Amino acid sequence: MAGTGVFEDIIDGEVFKYYTEGEWKKSASGKSVAIINPTTRTTQYKVQACTQEEVNKVMESAKIAQKQWAKTPLWKRAELLHKAAAILKEHKAPIADCLVKEIAKPAKDSVTEVVRSGDLISYCAEEGVRILGEGKFLVSDSFPGNERTKYCLTSKIPLGVVLAIPPFNYPVNLAVSKIGPALIAGNSLVLKPPTQGAVACLHMVQCFHLAGFPKGLINCVTGKGSEIGDFLTMHPGVNCISFTGGDTGVAISKKAGMVPLQMELGGKDACIVLEDADLDLVAANIIKGGFSYSGQRCTAVKVVLVMESVADALVEKVNAKVAKLKVGPPEDNCDITPVVSESSANFIEGLAKDAKTKGATFCQEYKREGNLIWPLLLDNVRPDMRIAWEEPFGPIVPVIRINSIEEGIHHCNASNFGLQGCVFTSDINKAILISDAMETGTVQINSAPARGPDHFPFQGLKDSGIGSQGITNSINMMTKIKSTVINLPTPTYTMG
């Protein structure tokens, strides 16, 4: 149960506290933010509504703590991260229960997210020791016109204070994917969790607290985005922003100024299916890629572009699998659970209605109860329909029939998104050519789009983001190069 046992310090009455200076605190505002359970549509939890003044104090605390943390040996940083990972995995049950109630994630998937997060932290500790433990040595005479009179030593140093903003759909995993790299690299951290998923994040932060990290190094502030959102992202104390989410990221990037950004902002991941594809494999991946966690994933299959000659057969196979999907509450480990909010459900419904008006074929009857939307495959979708371009973030997958590979590539590349895509074919040569032509950060061959394993590079083109994630890339992004040049009075050559 949330807020009990080793987590009893993080709650005061009905309201969960925020975390700074190694302590759990109540906001001076006296206000709270309600977290609505997507299944019951009633208030499940409440968190502190922090003030701008409290944000200022958090930033100052993080700045001071970072200076000392940067002097902490790499092996010690890694040791604490391994300890936090073990504590997180030990207490996976109550954290997973928060995910079930806050974001309606199926129970088994919620446990998987927490365990995966612990593994990510441990891998991050090991990778950080490897890549940060090495520097570079340069000599001046490798550049034309120079004698060997200069030795250059380079190393990676921390940026300072990292602001981490994860999304609702993976609030724990996508929080630690920012926290782990930041900490091993010598940075301090300010975490602003999403409202839906905030309590799971607060439990996760307590695991870091129990591991014994220095006071002020890790901070977690909760509150209304309208009150502290811009204040956080534009704060002069922030030295780096790592954000995963939607359109808000575009606004952040315009306001952030001279601050390194790491952003993943969603996608319209296309699935191109050729005539020679294994249709059983394709159907299974459309189900997995398009409908897992009710389609609320940045890497979900969001449009199927299938060659006309095999379209009927593919749609038939997918429909057969859709009929077997279990729909219901997350506690029952259903395949399709309620989407995160009423506004999300309304948006998805709007896309479905637009497609219906413009003549799409509904392979299932559209059905909705509250935030719960039954899985829907739309056939004969045309480019003039909103669902052909917009990201539904729900259990609705459009099928567009194409007559050539070029047509499929053109539709994929015409999107303003460019996160991931996939191609299904038995011809590896065609697969590589199509992969090279698709304007996306990653192309999966004969599998649905996916983020991970977590050490793989993960990035988007166009409106899908800035920079690259993945453990190694994130560690490098959260550091900068420091050079020290030794100037010699005369040229010197080894064994010269």
Image (cartoon, helix red, strand yellow):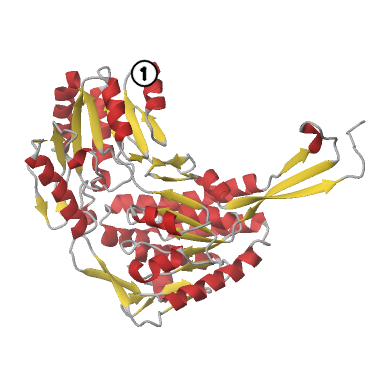
Local secondary structure at mark 1: helix
Residue of label 1: 430
Residue at horizontal 44%, vertical 41%? 458
Residue 481 position (above or below residue 211): above
Residue type pointed to by label 1? Lys
| Relative horizontal placement of residue 183, taking residue 437 as reference (left or right) | right
| Relative horizontal placement of residue 364, taking residue 17 as reference (left or right) | left
| Relative horizontal placement of residue 458, taking residue 138 as reference (left or right) | left
Q: Position of residue 3 (x, y in %)?
A: 36, 71
Residue 426 position (above or below residue 144): above
Any part of residue 381 in sight: yes
The quadrant holding residue 143 is top right
The quadrant holding residue 31 is bottom left
Q: Quadrant of the N terminus?
A: bottom left
Residue 198 position (above or below residue 434): below
Q: In front: 390, or 132?
A: 390
Residue at horizontal 51%, vertical 76%? 57
Q: In front: 398, or 100?
A: 398
Q: Position of residue 225 (x, y in %)?
A: 35, 66
Looking at the rendered structure, the number of numbered marks drawn on it comes to 1
